[in-house]
Image: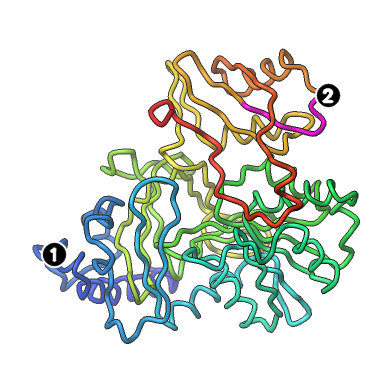
């Protein structure tokens, strides 16, 4: 066993004893002998599902005395009961360290504008920790608030000579469209800007390339969740590396029965080795991912992770199964790329709603053909107005977008 595995095994044993202080795991693991838990035994331990977390309630996952808690967070999903997550000061410092692994390489020379919401969501606070740990300055320009509407953020980027902009991928697209409405281009308006950091939404390869083309700077993606903190970060070569000193990531079949082969799609199952406040054992988070060993030029040893979206967004039509990643790749292959889009699952196929200020360049027939060739599912297209551009240049906060509407939710 190499030194990394020895460290992970020690951390797993410590975490396993620690989580049994939480009501959730005190009950869930009561019948399991815990004297000799190791990496080889992990697959024999029970999964933790989203339903387990919901049933456990707010305090169910809490594994420390409340006096040790520094912050409380909740998931911000559009459906269902939010999941709770508790963070000690040590957890927040660990989260900052995790984001320091990102290929953006924050330093004391940087001023980072954080556009993630400073609310119940987690990314803004962890990125702020990463900035403080590297000496970078922070501009807390929270999203989804009337305090910092899109024109104000653009003004701050310019006035403060911001070097790194961080937020949801959608915010990068909306800021670029707001700048266009104001008569400027983000690709030339901010000469000090050197990089974008994004998280909180799926970002396929084509979407990443589109945002990089808009802003003319590299984009660094991060993958995680409120319940787990940040699991993987993108290096300077575009590879998403798992932070293996803090996480064990399994990729299982849909029923959770056994692992899939390296590089194959499966369901993410996360064990948080370092988390103190509300650690999780084999958390079956319903994300579709693939993991394979990395031989990246950056030298990081963490395995490579690819995120394909959430299982709830997976669409099965006849013998064809497509994930949100596939839909993004198709949409962001269009020319011009829409400023806003939404896809509706229907009995007879997929119906795409597309919005662009350059819509005159589109042909519905050509777009249908292009989307069908990518997805191999019958497609209809409606060129419409999804984005209220008046709101973008007004003091109106954004809302969480819905990109895929399943038939059962219609």
**Residue placed at 48% from the left, 61% from the top?**
231
Mark closer to the observer (2, 1):
2
Residue 139, horizontal then vertical, whole percent: 70, 74
Q: Nearer the viewer, residue 69 or 305?
A: 69
Identify the image quadrant of the C terminus: top left
Side (left or right) of 402 relative to 366: left
Tag 2–tag 1 contact (CB < 8 Å) = no
- Magenta range: 353-360
Mark 2 or mark 1: which comes first in sequence? 1
The local secondary structure at tag 1 comes to: helix
Identify the image quadrant of the N terminus: bottom left
* Callout 2 crowding tier (Cα within 10 Å): few <14, some 14–19, many ≥20: few
* Callout 1 crowding tier (Cα within 10 Å): few <14, some 14–19, many ≥20: few
Outermost residue on the bottom side: it is 67
The local secondary structure at tag 2 comes to: helix
Circle number at residue 27: 1
Side (left or right) of 356 relative to 59: right
Colour approach in the figure: rainbow
Rendered view: 267 above or below 186 = above
Circle number at residue 361: 2
Q: Judge whether residue 356 is colored magenta.
A: yes
Residue 320, horizontal then vertical, whole percent: 47, 21
**Residue placed at 40% from the left, 49% from the top?**
268
């Amino acid at each position: 066993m190499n030194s990394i595995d020895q460290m992970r095994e020690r951390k797993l044993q410590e975490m396993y004893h620690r989580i049994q202080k939480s009501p959730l795991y005190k009950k869930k693991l009561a019948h399991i002998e815990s004297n000799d838990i190791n990496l080889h035994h992990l697959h024999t331990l029970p999964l933790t599902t989203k339903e387990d977390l919901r049933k456990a309630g707010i305090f169910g996952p809490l594994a420390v005395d409340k006096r040790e808690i520094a912050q409380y967070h909740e998931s911000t999903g559009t459906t269902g009961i939010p999941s709770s997550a508790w963070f000690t000061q040590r957890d927040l410092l660990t989260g900052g360290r995790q984001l320091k692994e990102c290929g953006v390489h924050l330093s004391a020379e940087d001023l980072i504008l954080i556009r993630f919401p400073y609310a119940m969501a987690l990314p803004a606070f962890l990125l702020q920790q990463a900035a403080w740990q590297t000496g970078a300055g922070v501009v807390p320009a929270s999203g989804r608030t009337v305090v910092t509407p899109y024109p104000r953020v653009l003004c701050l980027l310019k006035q403060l000579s911001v070097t790194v902009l961080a937020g949801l991928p959608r915010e990068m697209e909306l800021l670029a469209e707001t700048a266009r409405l104001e008569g400027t281009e983000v690709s030339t308006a901010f000469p000090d800007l050197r990089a974008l950091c994004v998280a909180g939404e799926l970002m396929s390869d084509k979407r990443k390339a589109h945002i990089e083309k808009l802003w003319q700077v590299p984009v660094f993606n991060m993958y995680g969740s409120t319940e787990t903190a940040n699991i993987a970060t993108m290096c300077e070569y575009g590879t998403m590396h798992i932070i293996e000193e803090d996480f064990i990531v399994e990729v299982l079949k849909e029923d959770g029965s056994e692992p899939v082969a390296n590089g194959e799609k499966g369901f993410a199952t996360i064990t948080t080795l370092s988390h103190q406040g509300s650690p999780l054992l084999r958390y079956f988070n319903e994300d579709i991912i693939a993991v394979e060993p990395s031989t990246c030029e950056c030298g990081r040893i963490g395995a490579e992770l690819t995120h394909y979206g959430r299982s709830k967004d997976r669409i099965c039509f006849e013998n064809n199964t497509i994930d949100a990643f596939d839909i993004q790749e198709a949409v962001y292959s269009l020319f011009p790329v829409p400023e806003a889009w939404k896809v509706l699952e229907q009995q007879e196929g997929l119906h795409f709603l597309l919005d662009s200020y350059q819509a005159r360049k589109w042909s519905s027939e050509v777009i249908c053909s292009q989307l069908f060739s990518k997805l191999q599912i019958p497609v209809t297209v409606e060129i419409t107005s999804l984005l209220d551009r008046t709101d973008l240049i007004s003091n109106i906060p954004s809302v969480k977008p819905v990109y895929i509407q399943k038939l059962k939710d219609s």
